[in-house]
């Protein structure tokens, strides 16, 4: 009990000292310095922004004698092999015998997860629609991009 009270007193002392004006001032100055320096560095011009990024030619770089484009394709090939391996294991597991009580619990978990994912999907669709409207307004009307480029950004 004594240790709990001592920890509580120590915690209240720390919160009182952090809430003092002298402790808030350095944090506010540091925040202003960071924001001011980032604004000074980010000088807007016609080639700034994610929409104007120029992707490098992947064939011009190599890693251990393999060019970047071929290395990327090999990575995608590994992804496809992993997907096929996962499907094969899934089909084998689906054919295994299972106890009735275990199947009931599995179905309950499946239905619960499905309901959760549908709810999350609806939320993400609404969020995506909101972000899409903002992207359309920004890139389509304010920056006057071509409709195809706005579609690609979306």
Image (cartoon, grey):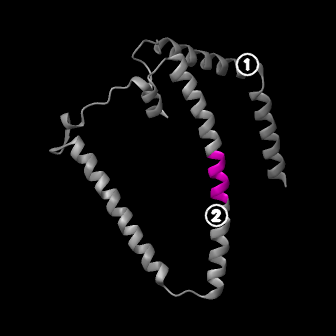
Q: Residue drawn at (23%, 42%), measured in percent from left and top?
A: 69
Q: As displayed, is residue 39 above or below residue 110?
A: above
Label 1, secondary structure: give it.
helix
Q: Tell me the element at label 2.
A: helix
Closer to the camera in the image, 23 or 138? 138
Residue located 36% across and 68% down the image: 85
Q: Which mark is residue 113?
A: 2
| Residue lying at 66% horizontally and 80% vertically, measured from the top left | 104
Q: Nearer the viewer, residue 12 or 121?
A: 121
Specify the farthest residue to the left: 65
Residue 80 is situated, as x and y percent measured from the top left of the image, at 34, 59
Question: Is residue 117 shown in magenta?
Answer: yes
Residue 145 drawn at (x, y percent): 45, 21
Position of 95 with respect to 60 (left or right) is: right
List the single residue furthest toward the front: 147
Density class for disc 2 (Cα within 10 Å; few <14, some 14-19, many ≥20) is few
Q: Please provide the residue range marked out in magenta.
A: 116-124
Along the line of sight, which residue is nearer the eye, 43 or 5?
Answer: 43
Q: Earlier in the sequence, mark 2 or mark 1?
A: 1
Q: Is residue 89 above or below residue 20?
A: below
Q: Could you say where residue 103 lies in the image, as x and y percent from the top left? A: 62, 81
**83 relative position to 19: left or right:** left
Q: Quadrant of residue 138?
A: top right
Indicate left or right for 27 with 9 as reference: left
Q: Image point 78% across, 33% down: which residue?
A: 15
Does 97 appear in magenta?
A: no
């Amino acid at each position: 009990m004594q240790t709990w009270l001592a920890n509580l007193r120590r915690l209240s002392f720390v919160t009182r000292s952090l809430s003092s004006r002298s402790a808030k001032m350095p944090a506010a100055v540091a925040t202003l310095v960071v924001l001011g320096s980032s604004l000074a560095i980010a000088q807007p011009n016609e080639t700034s922004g994610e929409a104007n990024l120029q992707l490098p030619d992947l064939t011009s770089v190599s890693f251990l004698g393999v060019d970047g484009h071929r290395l990327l394709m090999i990575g995608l090939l590994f992804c496809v092999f992993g997907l096929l391996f996962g499907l094969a294991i899934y089909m084998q597991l689906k054919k295994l015998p299972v106890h009735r009580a275990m199947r009931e619990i599995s179905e309950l978990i499946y239905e619960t997860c499905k309901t959760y994912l549908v709810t999350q999907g609806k939320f993400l669709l609404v969020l995506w629609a909101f972000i899409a409207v903002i992207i359309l307004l920004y890139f389509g009307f304010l920056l006057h991009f071509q409709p195809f480029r706005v579609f690609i950004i979306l």
